[in-house]
Image (cartoon, coloured by chain):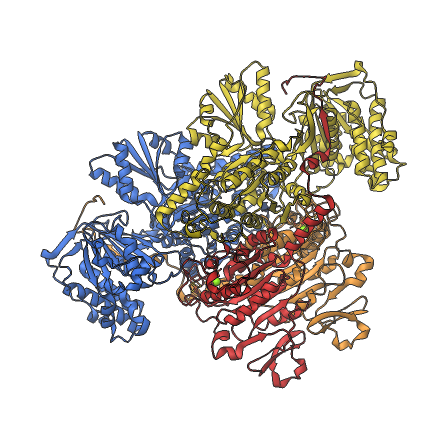
Chain colours: A blue, B orange, C red, D yellow
């Protein structure tokens, strides 16, 4: 649109002499919760995405809604890695750190790599902020920042100047500060500027003066780069050669929500989501509640028990029923999940894992609910468990969970975690028609002698029972949580029947192994060591394996998306390697399952620190095991 | 279409397993009779219960049904009702199932006005677990778990339901099948949550708890029938209810101007009067009102949920997932990409 | 003994972490001030909260405290109060923590009349989870989880508490620290459960929700102060509350006989009038009563529990376990037993 | 008392010619729920106990309060084994079956051993009852009862006759029927009669005519035996040579309740029990609520969450806090247990296991909550788990659970099951003074610099944190479910702190292994095969081992009372046997733990039929493994 173009920044001649071309780059924006770092990071990411880089992001915000300004708990950060090849993580140590205030510097400087670029808002380094951050003198004048390329920008001042004619005033002026930083970064890293300007115009179309202020500030930052003496060297990361196709940048929660909608279409069932808000699962509710025109029903229940309860009701009544929460909420649901298992009704239970136990670390990633997923119910109640490996994988695993639930008439646990949920990655938009359907056949006619309906008469292949929904004439039946007689479904206290039903339910779930893909080995099949992962460690494991290979060693990787039952070939695969390493963000839960299942002495690499693995941590461990 | 059913059409092949003499038998008969009378296809009914003697109910009614887990029936029923407005969804619960462990789901279903018919069999005891006091048991009651007498001040189920914004609240008693069926009729006709407290005798663990409103002698003096549009009088007209100083009060009819006697109006938008009437008794120990306390219309949860879906669909058209996915900014990588790089270590 | 504390004695070394401008700050100040004024030893107070912004409260009060899990504070506090009658136990909760997931524990604590001071910070939103509607949010509210507007009919917390047999029920608002402290004083003096709904502004996700009772202009016309023994009038005396046909009704003072105006009596045994007054508003959208709705005495749960223990002990004497074990029939095997057999297979 | 003596039955000369002396005898009373079989069995048991037999009982009642009279679901039974030596179970196949109606016969006849004695109430075998039981002709006239010694007694008739002068009338008359059966059994098996008569007089002292009727009916039954032609052979089981001392006959729930009272005395803490009724745990509440003069506070909460919540509050306030339930209720408690684990407050969670999943089989025994006990919480929250092996063992394990909880400041899970809870056994009353105390030291003084109290400053030996209860001046502190900083207990989101606290909590619990007894091997230490058990399989395992030994083979047994952590010597013990058999009433849960922990290929014997193991089932498996 004209308005935008006339606002646009003229293309520059990248002056090769001062431009380093890099294959990849890790950038971290850090500032106060109020400084809009998530937004700045997001814009930088989108601009890079549109430019064609591969990328991966890792947001990191405090548990408080908004801790006091300038304090350490108030610091919010956003890390993104961009590259000219396909990458797998948001990177370990940033090459460039933006610190909008002393607290941000205090918290993140230690991560900046040797010789990295440090960009600070010098205006924020006053007495008050310094002491809030715990500095007794200004670190910018100290040895602390030696060894880094420091760019000091008086962002408050320059932002004020830049926006003074835009009409915004008062507290709102400095709201544009993050765009100043973004502009400077755009210049420093040769990011396309138009996408950001267009985005601002569209986003704030109703608030033209805010749009003007942000753009003015963005340009000011860009120009500051061109004019400042602080640095003459700029960096560039060329587009990556990703598989051809159309991409979008997606987070795990969004992908999961869309996957559920896709599953609804593939199964031909209306989607019902009964839940209670909880970090980091709430965004799934938020996303789904926006798409009522897909026939999606969202129910914000009074608690998690009502959330899963409503889903059980919706399942009985014929919906694709889903409930979702995080650890504390899943714990509350466990009695009801056991009922769903007994009723043999299809439903999906989503657990977006976070740091535990108890309230734990609500905004941090962790994988400590795996054993809980398998054994977190009273009685013998094994249910299928699947896990998403990456943000975009959540789309596919949501569909897979639905397929298993419906095909086998069973509740299915779908695991994600705070990393998968909030991180983003470019996603090659799939051809939706290519995703196979699994349309549901509700029971329509009596299946027993003399017109009787037998709710526990099973399909001899899947062992699934028929799904007869209320409203179907002649199939009136009652089900419940007491043990029931095989075939008839009537209450039964008969010992041998209980044995039979216990075995049948277990067998039905175990048999799913014959209907899931085998685990795939990637990398050097002939290596001595295999790195086995599940969930959000996918990227770190593969990236670590790459490093090890670059160091001239052989290593294979495999990743589990099905945790119960395991793929049929898992045992053979594991046994075919001398050493098996299992990195997990817990104390060794998959490790325990593998040991029990295969009596195999695998090695665990375990971290419970509320943050993902650094690639280096895994690579080092592999090297140590190879030696 | 209406079918002519008889009660037996709503009986199942399952043997009814309550103690001989249990009030549940009578309630079952009343409900089956009522359902048969409606002539509505059997398959359109769903009965959901929790756990307890009362909650065995669905096994004995030949419709769709679920005997779920303790206290959760209202939540499960909400999932059914809000996804299937074409069904008639009933909740069967007890004073423990509904007011103790299930109290929260009950009050939330009531405030949301989900289209559920909720029958709470109140025997003022935990029957299935063999006789502990319940949230409706009187103070001082000695039971297995209160050998020195209960110190729990009980709920008044009608007051609690009214405090939770219930749009339909009534009370009846197992023995009076005609009264029960009359109430069921109004509850069924009501759009939204209908809460019915049914006094139910547990002859094994709490026998004769409701003798004041069921006993041949006693009921004459103690049963206050609330009838829409009629003055609230009882004891053969000898006693009446008036409002004094904002409170419902029992007086000798003779002692007051007939115009002062409360004329019952179950449709009052303001629940204050219904609430005041519920305070005439705090359990069936003296004069106790039976009948419909409140019966007002308010949008129902399930209708609203489906309205929003219909509106969104007509506004934006049926969802197109591919369009949705492409709605947050996309970029395209061409077939042949100049800057081709292999994958490297990172 | 009473100590002379200042507010700072009740502050902790923990940095207060609410959004700048949050109403929680004001409430914290009011409570600390009030506690200091009591001069009761700090160590005798316990603050228990659930989860939510409001529930961060205990970290900032220099007494014993527990930041527990979502909705369970009343249950946990019941365990403290009933085992330690020597303590003053306070519950801090939010409209989500207390009325949504914690609703059942709340109403049961109220009916039992456990000696708890329950402060519910009602900001009509889920703050900590970044802004979803709550059980007290108005119908139609658009939030992250209700983009097309909420379809949940809200609770009236005061009505719900009264329906749950609460013996002390009050409402105040964050901004008015004097009013808050006056209410705290009465709540503290009350033996048993004291429930206080505190309107609390969430300036980030639900700003100005209570403007009608806090706004300089608005409050003049909409704030109804309930004062014990005084006629219920507001709007500078222009408006008054009377009972008409059993319902509390707002009228122009001039239009009625002053004797007809309700004189507030918080000690009425029958909660009907208190309930009727709670129906004057269904949220802070127009004329809304603040103050103590009900304040009656009834045996408290913890006192009763301890009475039964004292009685049993004085009746039967302190327990003798050895005697107890031998009380169900014993027999003795002598040193040398004639029919000596080894152990055999069975 | 005179009254009783004049009522008493004259001692008889046991006529050796017609009296078989047996070493052990299994008897089962079966009848309608209304027939008072539990009472009859209980009296027979007590009489035998007082007579000096060793014994073990197994009651078995329907889930319904009272199913319709005469139907199969309405049948209630009580089995007791008496012996002249120490026995371990209630026996497999009864030697004598009392069937009060056709339904009872239909349900239990199949269990009666070849040539066993069958006693029936012939009056109950009419058309109606026969058809209710599913007989189309009278089995007593059929081949079905061939091969048994059948004693038909017209119990209704004879009872009516016997009680006609006692003043009872109407429906009450036949209430005494069970005493007729009891009297007949007393004669047939030479049971002392006086204890029963005394018991009746005491029990019904306020209802003399009922007492008279029961005694009259009891005598009538006894005399029927003497006069009937049906049999001349009687049986006798001599007293057992149990260790000297005073005994009482006790059920597991009762022992557990008393153990908690003992723990309260040993720790010097008042006992608080917060719970919600549920089968089969309710009796613990019932028992404790009767003993307020021990300072016991029982709180019947609105649900299980409030039950455990109130216990957490009571623990914080300084009580010995306990909550108890069965599977479905424990599931509801799991979120709160995770909080207690995070708070590091001492408390006991009792799980009296029953048949699952969901509502399952509420009145049947099962061991299917073991993995649930270890992993049934979100996050990394390992808590100690102990299990009672027998009814009387529940007394000791309750004390042990309290000792661990208090010493290590942690919630402890105490497992029982429906078998341990309701079965009874003679218990040699211990010398209470001999049980060591574990008096609690509450924190009284600040433990940090400048008078600060540090709630997470640990005892360097146990790693327990201090227990400072409200009311203690100067120790005011706040705790909560968010991760907390080591030592200070303040909220902390620091990665390394989370790792430290996770490890510390795990280590604290693991370290308990150094403070519990080693697992003890019984039987033939030098055998090739070890039978490893936990919980209620204790008796069956040992009895089976005995049989195997009688058959001339060697077998060792070991039983786990501590399931987490395991005794330190467990690994060495297991590895020192060629074969390890683990019988469990589940699908192999301890088996899975053993495999994971020790990479040891043990064999499982698993049964999920809502009933305990028959000794024969285990013995056969051992033999099969020996071969
Ligand atoms: C989660 C759970 N807690 C407890 C129980 C045990 N229980 C079953 S029914 C019941 C109470 C029944 O009382 P009520 O609801 O009044 O029904 P009634 O038997 O009196 O008809 C209890 C405590 C259970 N089955 N599940
Ligand atoms: C079991 C459980 N479910 C859900 C959550 C997420 N959660 C935390 S606070 C909260 C609601 C907070 O609302 P409110 O009680 O009104 O407190 P406010 O933040 O508004 O002060 C929710 C849903 C949780 N922490 N635990
Ligand atoms: S226990 Fe009471 S309520 Fe339950 S079936 Fe028997 S009589 Fe009815
Ligand atoms: S979100 Fe709202 S309630 Fe929470 S701290 Fe911020 S302003 Fe206060
Ligand atoms: Mg009941
Ligand atoms: Mg709130």
Q: Give the quadrant of residue A98.
A: bottom left
Picture coordinates of residue B39, whole percent (x, y): 65, 57
> Which image quadrant: the N terminus of chain A?
bottom left
Picture coordinates of residue D426, whole percent (x, y): 67, 28
Q: Is residue A528 visible?
A: yes
Q: In this rendering, would A197 be left or right of D378?
A: left
Picture coordinates of residue A45, whole percent (x, y): 26, 57
> Which image quadrant: the C terminus of chain A?
top left
Q: Residue furthest left?
A: A17
Q: Quick one: D293 or B302, which is closer to the camera?
A: D293
Count the marks.
0
Q: Can you say whether D546 is above or below D36 in the image?
A: above
Q: In this rendering, would A614 be left or right of D177?
A: left
Q: Can you say whether A240 is above or below D608 in the image?
A: below
Q: Quick one: B37 or C320, which is closer to the camera?
A: C320
Q: Is residue A442 visible?
A: no
Q: Can you say whether D600 is above or below D380 in the image?
A: above
Q: Give the quadrant of residue B85.
A: bottom right
Picture coordinates of residue C101, whole percent (x, y): 52, 56
Q: In this rendering, would D171 be left or right of C172?
A: right
Q: Give the quadrant of residue B317.
A: bottom left
Residue at (31% x, 73% y) in the render = A170
Q: Residue furthest right?
A: D165
């Amino acid at each position: 649109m004209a308005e935008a173009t006339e606002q646009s920044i003229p293309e520059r001649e990248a002056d090769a002499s001062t431009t380093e071309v890099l294959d990849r780059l890790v950038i971290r924006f850090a500032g106060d919760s109020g400084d809009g770092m998530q937004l700045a990071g997001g814009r930088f990411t989108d601009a890079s995405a549109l430019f064609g880089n591969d990328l991966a992001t890792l947001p990191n915000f405090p548990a408080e809604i908004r801790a006091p300004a300038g304090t350490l708990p108030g610091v919010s950060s956003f890390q993104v890695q961009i590259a000219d090849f396909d990458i797998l993580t948001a990177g370990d140590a940033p090459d460039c750190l933006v610190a909008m205030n002393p607290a941000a510097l205090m918290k993140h400087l230690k991560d900046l790599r040797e010789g990295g670029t440090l960009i600070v808002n010098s205006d924020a380094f006053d007495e008050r902020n310094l002491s809030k951050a715990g500095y007794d003198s200004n670190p910018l004048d100290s040895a602390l920042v030696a060894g880094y390329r420091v760019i000091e920008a008086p962002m408050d001042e320059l932002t004020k100047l830049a926006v003074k004619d835009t009409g915004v005033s008062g507290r709102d002026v400095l709201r544009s500060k993050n765009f100043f930083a973004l502009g400077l970064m755009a210049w420093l890293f040769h990011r396309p500027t138009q996408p950001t300007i267009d985005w601002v115009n569209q986003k704030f179309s109703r608030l033209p003066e805010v749009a003007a202020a942000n753009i003015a500030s963005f340009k000011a930052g860009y120009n500051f780069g061109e004019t400042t003496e602080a640095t003459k060297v700029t960096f560039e990361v060329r587009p990556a050669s990703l598989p051809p196709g159309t991409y979008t940048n997606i987070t795990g929660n969004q992908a999961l929500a869309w996957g559920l909608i896709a599953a609804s279409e593939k199964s031909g069932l209306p989607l019902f989501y009964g839940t209670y808000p909880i970090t980091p699962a709430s965004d799934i509710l938020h996303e789904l509640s926006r798409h009522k025109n897909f026939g999606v029903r969202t129910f914000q229940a009074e608690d998690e028990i009502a959330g899963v309860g409503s889903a059980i009701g919706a399942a009985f009544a014929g919906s694709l029923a889903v409930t979702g929460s995080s650890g504390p909420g899943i714990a509350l649901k466990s009695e009801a999940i056991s009922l769903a298992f007994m009723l043999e009704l299809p439903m999906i239970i989503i657990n977006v894992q976070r740091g535990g136990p108890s309230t734990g670390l609500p905004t941090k990633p962790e994988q400590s609910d795996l054993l809980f997923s398998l054994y977190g119910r009273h009685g013998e109640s094994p249910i299928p468990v699947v896990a998403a490996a990456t943000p975009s994988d959540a789309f596919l695993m949501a569909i897979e969970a639905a397929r298993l639930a419906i095909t086998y008439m069973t509740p299915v646990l779908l695991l994600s975690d705070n990393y998968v949920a909030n991180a983003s990655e470019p996603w090659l938009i799939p051809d939706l028609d290519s995703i196979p359907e699994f349309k549901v056949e509700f029971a329509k006619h009596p299946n027993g002698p003399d017109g009787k309906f037998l709710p526990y008469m099973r399909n001899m292949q899947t062992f699934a029972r028929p799904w007869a929904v209320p409203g179907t004439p002649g199939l009136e039946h009652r089900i419940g949580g007491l043990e029931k007689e095989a075939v008839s479904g009537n209450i039964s206290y008969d010992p041998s029947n209980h044995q039979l039903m216990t075995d049948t339910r277990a067998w039905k779930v175990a048999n799913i192994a014959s209907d899931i893909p085998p685990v795939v080995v990637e990398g050097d099949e002939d290596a001595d060591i295999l790195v086995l992962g599940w969930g959000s460690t996918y990227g770190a494991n593969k990236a670590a394996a790459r490093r090890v290979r670059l160091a001239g060693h052989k290593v294979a990787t495999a990743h589990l998306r099905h945790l119960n039952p395991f793929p049929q070939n898992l045992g053979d695969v594991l046994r075919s390697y001398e050493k098996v390493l299992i990195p997990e963000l817990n104390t060794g839960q998959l490790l325990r399952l593998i040991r029990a299942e295969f009596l195999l002495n695998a090695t665990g690499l375990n971290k419970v620190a509320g943050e993902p693995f650094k690639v280096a941590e895994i690579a080092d461990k592999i090297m140590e095991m190879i030696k | 279409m209406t079918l002519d059913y008889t009660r037996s059409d709503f009986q199942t092949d399952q043997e009814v397993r309550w103690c001989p003499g249990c009030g549940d038998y009578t309630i079952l008969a009343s409900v089956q009779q009522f359902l048969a009378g409606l002539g509505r296809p059997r398959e359109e009914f769903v009965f959901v219960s929790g756990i307890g003697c009362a909650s065995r109910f669905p096994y004995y009614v030949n419709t769709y049904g679920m005997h779920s887990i303790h206290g959760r029936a209202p939540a499960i029923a909400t999932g059914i009702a809000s996804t299937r407005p074409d069904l008639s969804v009933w909740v069967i619960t007890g004073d423990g199932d509904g007011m103790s462990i299930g109290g929260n789901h009950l009050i939330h279903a009531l405030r949301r006005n989900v289209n559920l018919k909720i029958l709470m069999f109140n025997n003022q005891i935990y029957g299935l677990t063999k006789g502990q006091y319940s949230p409706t048991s009187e103070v001082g009651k000695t039971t297995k778990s209160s050998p020195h007498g209960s110190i729990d001040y009980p709920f008044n189920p009608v007051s609690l339901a009214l405090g939770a914004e219930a749009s339909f609240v009534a009370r009846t008693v197992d023995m009076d099948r005609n009264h029960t069926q009359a109430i069921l009729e109004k509850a069924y006709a009501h759009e939204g949550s209908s809460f019915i407290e049914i006094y139910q005798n547990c002859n094994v663990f709490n026998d004769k708890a409701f003798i004041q409103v069921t006993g041949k002698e006693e009921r004459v003096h103690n049963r206050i029938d609330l009838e829409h549009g009629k003055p609230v009088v009882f004891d053969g007209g000898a006693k009446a209810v008036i409002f004094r100083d904002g409170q419902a009060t029992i007086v000798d009819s003779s002692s007051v101007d007939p115009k002062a006697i409360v004329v019952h109006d179950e449709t009052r938008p303001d629940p204050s009067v219904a609430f005041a009437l519920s305070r005439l008794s705090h359990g069936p120990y003296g004069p106790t009102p039976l009948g419909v306390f409140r019966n007002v219309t308010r949008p129902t949860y399930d209708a609203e949920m489906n309205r929003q879906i219909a509106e969104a669909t007509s506004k934006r058209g049926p969802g197109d997932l591919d369009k949705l996915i492409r709605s947050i900014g996309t970029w395209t990588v061409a077939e042949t990409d100049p800057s081709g790089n292999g994958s490297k270590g990172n």
